[in-house]
Amino acid sequence: MIARAFGFLLLSALPLAAGGTLDGRIVTLNVETWNDDLLPFFVSEGRTVTVGADVEFDMLPEGRTVGFDVVPVRVEIRPTRIEFSYGEEVGRFLDAPFNGYVLRFAVECALIEGAKIDPAGTTMPVADADIRSDGGALFIDVAGLDYGPKAKLAIDLAVSDCLLG
């Protein structure tokens, strides 16, 4: 009984793990801002790439909406991790029911089995509750948070081993 309890404690202390990888997967990134009805009133132009060794996204302002725009962000996707970093511009993300990033992976399965903020790689006050997955989509809410050259966000993921899409 003690051995079983110790084994459970040891396993629960380990980082997220699963059998899959994001490497080689097709993903589209959008910045979305939702109103009180949880309907998007701003959706950036989607950018689609295949996850590989280089930085996947270097998003810049689009200049198509008066009053707010995409905040410059660099997104690197690793096999089981996503990292966000920001340029020299300093500011605060619009406070809304949801204002953040939506990564949609081209799969027909529940790709993300778990997501957890890596505090060692994160300087922004983002909580695990600010991240959710739905099928092949990952939602990361940064509403009301500050950004700038020191702002970083690192998310460790448990990825299922469903077929590449």
Image (cartoon, grey):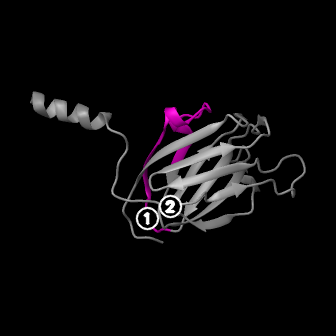
x and y percentages locating residue 38 in the rendered image: 67, 48
What label sits on residue 13 in the rendered view?
A: none
The magenta span reads 107-132
Is 110 situated above or below 11?
A: below
Give SS at disc 2: loop
Q: Does the magenta portion include 111?
A: yes
Q: Report the number of discs.
A: 2
The amino acid marked with disc number 2 is Gly
Secondary structure state at the residue bearing disc 1: loop
- State the image coordinates of residue 115 (x, y, percent, origin top left): 46, 45
Mark 1 crowdedness (10 Å alpha carbons): few <14, some 14-19, many ≥20 = some
Which residue is the extreme one toward the top?
A: 2
Crowd rating for badge 2 (residues with CA inside 10 Å; few <14, some 14–19, many 20+): some
| Residue 79 drawn above or below residue 140 | below
Please give the name of the residue rendered at 63% of the width and 67% of the height, measured from the top-left corner: 48
Quickly name the residue at label 2: 136
64 sits to left or right of 85: right
Picture residue at 45% right of the left edge, 56% below the top: 79
Give the residue pinned by disc 1. Answer: 109
